[in-house]
Image (cartoon, rainbow, N blue to C red):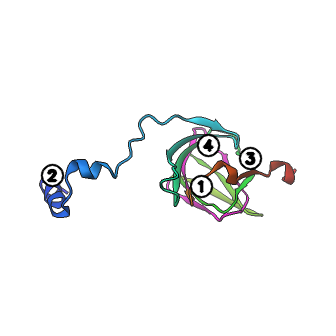
Amino acid sequence: MSDIEEGDHLQQSGLNISELMQFIQDNGEQTEYFFKEGCHITELLNSPENPEISVARARVEPGQTTRWHRLTDIAEHYLIVEGRGLAEVGEKSVYEVSAEDVVVIPAGVRQRITNTGEVDLLFLAICTPRFVPEAYHDIEAELD
């Protein structure tokens, strides 16, 4: 869409640029932290004001596997952005994953992911409803 067409579209919507900016969240200053699951997390969207969904960028280092876990009452989708790995979902399902693959994890189902590549495995973890720490259950010890 050209700048002229885009401007026409804005005029037709009845919104000005400042009104449109309220729909854009700037994530430039988000901090990555290490989560006990075994991966690095950057929260991109997760607030009580929007309880229907959360989005986080997850990073798993080469050769690392996250811990077996499940989320109570929260479904999760992994949108693989970069790298490759093995996603394990449920009792016996193992999937090779790479950029643009989506892993669907129903609420309450066990899961973990392994980075089988030589670069970081990056993916968006999209949770519905939004992720809350109380929903995370480490089940690694139960499976040993």
Label 2 sits on residue: 3
Q: Which of marks 3 and 2 is nearer the N terminus?
A: 2
* Label total for image: 4
Label 1 sits on residue: 97
Along the horizontal axis of the image, is 106 left or right of 125?
A: right
Q: What element carries label 4?
A: loop
> Which mark is nearer the camera, 2 or 1?
2
Q: Which of marks 4 and 3 is nearer the N terminus?
A: 3
Q: Hey, what amino acid is under mark 4?
A: Gly
Along the horizontal axis of the image, is 27 left or right of 6?
A: right
Q: Between marks 4 and 2, how big is the CA–CA gap? A: 41 Å
Q: Give the range drawn in magenta.
A: 100-126
* Residue 125, percent from left and from top: 56, 52
* Residue 134, percent from left and from top: 69, 51
Using the image, tell me which numbered label, if any, was put on residue 67: 3
Q: Between marks 1 and 4, how big is the CA–CA gap? A: 11 Å
Q: Which of marks 1 and 4 is nearer the N terminus?
A: 1
Q: Earlier in the sequence, mark 2 or mark 1?
A: 2
* Residue 17, percent from left and from top: 21, 49
Corner quadrant of residue 93: bottom right
Label 4 sits on residue: 117
Q: Hey, which residue is sitting farthest front in the picture?
A: 49
